[in-house]
Amino acid sequence: MFEPDSHEYNLLTKVSVDQCLKCTICETQCPVMAVTELFPGPKFVGPQAERFRDGQSVDRSLDYCSSCGTCTLVCPQQVKVAEINSVARAAMKRHHMPLRDRLISRTTAMGALMRPVAPLANAALAWRPLRVLVEQIIGLHRQAAVPRSAGRPFRSWWSHHTPSGAQDKGSVIFFHGCAGNWFEVQTAIEAVQILEHIGFRVIVPKQGCCGMACQSNGLFDDARRQVRRLAADLGQAPADLPIVSIAGSCQGMLKHEAAAILGLSDDPALQDVGQRTHDICQFLLDLAQEGKLPLDWRPNPATVVYHAPCQLKAQAMGQPAVALLRLVPDLQVVESNVTCCGIAGTYGLKKEKYDIAAAVGRPLFDLVEQVSPALVACDTETCRWQLRHHTGARVEHPIHLIHQAYGLG
């Protein structure tokens, strides 16, 4: 049930809905609607249905929206279609939240539980009989691309790390995100090594979950608590320093989702942290354009397919990774120009949505197989997991190729 006095209801429905002209552009571009009849489209379940909800339960087909955000990006009237749908889905699930959706939203807890028994946990998640049982009990698809524990978290590496480089360019705050700490640890390490190599002192404050997984599953109260706690943690570091992020989805939470979906647009700590947070590729590209980035890079005679994640598109920052990678000598960068890989955070992990997610991503998977089956670059973690799972390619954060270009071991 909707609560008409809630933050999210007032924020998104009173103004944005009436701007919809029913032009259906959002439906022509929706990657989910294109592959399944189970989802009637973002306009139908969003602005159109919103006019009739008036506090009543919403159509359950809304849950097949992946929240990729394409509808909002293409809307000529700037209607917040994806945001409206996210809020409506949270209202729909408020009183009957599946156990599965609660469990898969706890990224930090998952990483912490897997770490002490990483080899066993990774083997268990690859064991088909167990995955079949998990699918039957909680609805996590037996073939879904689940993360692998790195064993040693980034924070452990950092606690023993000795900084290198001149560190004459000042200081930056490093935001690694949950995946960077527990699962994609090497990416976080390489990012720190690059920042130090080019002359920055790196500060890594305490930081927990951003709440993105909870938000995308409709657990808004939990998401608000998590993102506020994160903003407070990041804000305790020197307040005038840029925050450099390798976590594309998490930085999206700080810069966009918390305000546009969770109704936290007036939170001063979030405003401050969001304004100071920079995607690492954007940060490095800005330095390059100012002539402040050392470009003594090694040639890399390879071809890489670059896929821009939905979360980065929602941040209206363009594709800084493409421009940055094209500065690497001999590296050929092919943009995917594909709307979505299908995973949409936790969407493609779910039993009833796994095949839909795979169908959404099929054009991307085919492109990878045709152009560069050996190497793909993508900025967000779950998209990388989805691409590895469906293509078998080596899929890296773009920063990995910059790390190679600098010859850092």
Image (cartoon, helix red, strand yellow):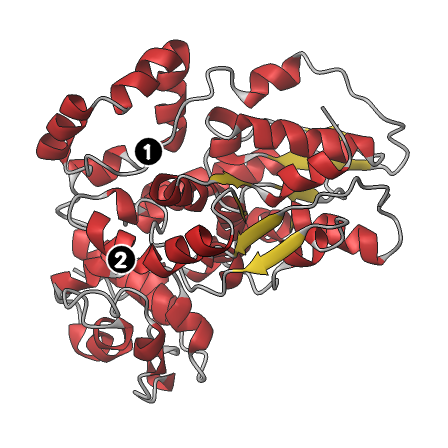
Query: Image point 51% across, 15% down: which residue?
Result: 152
Q: Which mark is residue 146?
A: 1
The residue drawn where x is 36% and y is 43% is: 213
Give left or right: position of 55 versus 182.
left
Question: Where residue 108 appears, x then y in whole percent?
Answer: 41, 28
Q: Is the residue marked by circle 1 packed among few (<14), some (14-19), or many (20+) residues within 10 Å? A: some
Q: Residue at x 41, y 22 (%)?
A: 149
Residue positioned 11% across, 26% down in the render: 133
**Camera-nearest residue between 228 and 63:** 63
Q: 295 or 3: nearer the eye?
A: 295
- Residue 200 image point, x, y percent: 81, 34
Q: Amino acid at mark 2?
A: Ala
**Placement of 131 over or under 53, stated as above or below:** above
Q: Secondary structure at mark 1?
A: loop
- Tag 2 residue: 359
Drawn side of residue 188 relative to residue 16, left or right: right
Q: Is residue 165 left or right of residue 217?
A: right
